[in-house]
Amino acid sequence: MLQVHSIETLGTNDGPGIRMVVFMQGCNFRCLYCHNPDTRPTKGGKEMSSEDILELLEKQRPYFKNTGGLTISGGEALLQRKALIDLFTKAKKAGFNTTLDSNGSILDEDAKKLLEVTDLVLLDVKHIDPVWHMTVTKASNETTLQFAKYLEEKGIPMWLRYVLVPGYTNQKEFLEKWGAHFQNYKNIKRVEILPFHTFGFYKYKELGIENPLEDCPVPTKEEVQEAVDIFKKYFKSVYVR
Ligand code: SF4
């Protein structure tokens, strides 16, 4: 059984084409800028089987056309990798594109099995510097970088994602390092910059938890452009979302 936080239909932000996006309950990171803090606790959510999700997917099949399909997001989807192997295997068999949106923090045998039935990974590499990564997410980036390398070795397509937060992730030297680290990866189909935003702030209030970035400004147009310009030195396709 899968613990599902929520489901978005006709999503256009998390992978190619039109998609059904399933947000899983539970996350092992504690990103300062998290806009879904309600997905983080491992308890809660709604129990759903692969069949429940496939039934919903089937209803949306006409919208997917050639590019759309199923995206599993979070929280952190890898926490439920065992159950997701079953879902992705069945979804692929039924002809749906399978996309995994992940922080890449787990790379065990089950995670590798899941990747065998994954068409595309949206990989968040939240900081290239280990110390800053720890500050921003309260977790190490070591496995995430190994995860990216593994995807490259296996030729599994990925979109790299980067949340741009003034004062935390927009240091020029580290944006350059991030780009240089990945520039020769052949499996990167695009790079997406996600400017930090405040849309999820109300959730912190609702949950009664402290919002560590309450006073953090959103990036200016110039700051976003600066990041785009740096990444464009290393990658052909750079998008701002
Ligand atoms: S990985 Fe995603 S869900 Fe988890 S804390 Fe970070 S932003 Fe929130």
Image (cartoon, grey):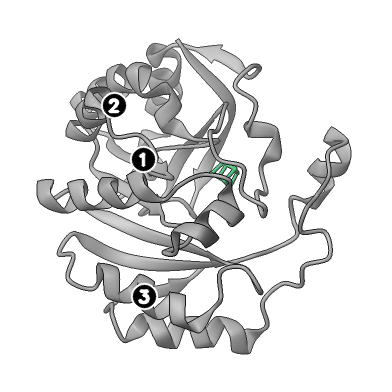
Lower sequence index among marks 2 and 3: 2
Q: Residue 17, percent across and down?
A: 37, 53
Q: Secondary structure at mark 3?
A: helix
Q: Mark 2 or 3, which is nearer the eye?
A: 3
- Who's the residue at 37% across and 51% down the image? 123
Lower sequence index among marks 2 and 1: 2
Residue 23 against residue 89 in the figure, above or below: below
- Who's the residue at 74% across and 50% down the image? 200
Residue 88 got which mark?
2
Lower sequence index among marks 3 and 1: 1
Q: Quadrant of ligand 1?
A: top right
Left or right, residue 38 beside residue 89: right
Distance of label 3 from label 1 (alpha carbons): 25 Å
Density class for disc 1 (Cα within 10 Å; few <14, some 14-19, many ≥20) is many
Q: Residue 140, percent across and down?
A: 45, 47
Distance of label 2 from label 3 (alpha carbons): 34 Å
Density class for disc 3 (Cα within 10 Å; few <14, some 14-19, many ≥20) is some
Q: Quadrant of the N terminus?
A: top left
Q: Residue 215, percent across and down?
A: 83, 65
Whether residue 169 is visible, yes or no, is: yes
Residue 177 got which mark?
3
Residue 28 against residue 109 in the figure, above or below: below
Whether residue 66 is visible, yes or no, is: no
Distance of label 2 from label 1 (alpha carbons): 10 Å
Q: Secondary structure at mark 2?
A: helix
Circles 2, 1 touching at the beta carbon (< 8 Å): yes
Q: Residue type at mark 2: give it.
A: Phe
Q: Secondary structure at mark 1?
A: strand
Residue 36 against residue 57 in the figure, above or below: below
- Res 181 → quadrant: bottom left
Q: Residue 87, percent across and down?
A: 33, 21
